[in-house]
Image: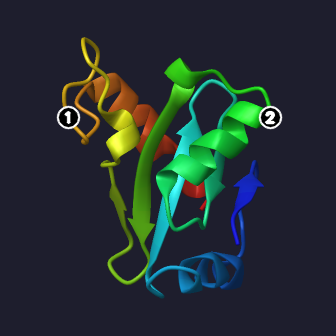
């Protein structure tokens, strides 16, 4: 179960999304332009495809996650590895990192 989220969700909703994977971690793909996320899938790729189907542009999408136990955002996903732009699975650009982390109030 994954869903597109554009406003803050309740802790119980976040826990339900996490149950789909490991019980404590939510995979997230964010559209930084639209300020929405897709969360709760086993793979970032599925979330990325859902956002692309709904009109998002590839260059606006970045992946990471949220650890419910530690209350910590992670900034790594294979979808972030973009030759010539971001040479790592981790989001390297400080501005993009800040934007991604700024969406924490949604989840």
Q: Residue at x 34, y 24 (%)?
A: 95
Task: Give the farthest residue toward the top.
Answer: 84
Residue 17: quadrant of the picture: bottom right
Name the secondary structure under disc 1: loop
* Image spot of residue 74 (x, y percent): 32, 56
Residue 76, percent across and down?
30, 49
* Residue matched to label 2: 54
Which residue appears at 71% of the width and 75% of the height?
A: 10
Q: How far separated are the C-alphas under marks 2 and 1?
A: 26 Å
Query: Is residue 87 found left or right of 80 in the rendered image?
Result: left
Residue nearer the viewer, 59 or 68: 59
Q: Residue at x 70, y 78 (%)?
A: 13
Image quarter of residue 80: top left
The answer to which image quadrant residue 90 occupies is top left
Residue 106 spot, x, y in % from top left? 64, 55
Query: Residue 88: which numbered mark, if any?
Result: 1
């Amino acid at each position: 179960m994954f869903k597109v989220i554009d406003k803050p969700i309740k802790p119980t909703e976040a826990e339900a999304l996490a149950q789909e994977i490991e019980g404590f971690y939510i995979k997230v793909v964010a559209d930084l332009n639209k300020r929405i996320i897709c969360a709760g899938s086993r793979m970032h790729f599925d979330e990325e495809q859902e956002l692309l189907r709904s009109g998002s542009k590839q260059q606006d999408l970045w992946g990471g996650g949220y650890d419910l136990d530690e209350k910590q955002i992670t900034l790594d996903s294979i979808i972030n590895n973009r030759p010539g732009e971001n040479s790592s699975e981790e989001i390297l650009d400080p501005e993009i990192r800040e934007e991604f982390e700024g969406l924490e109030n949604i989840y």
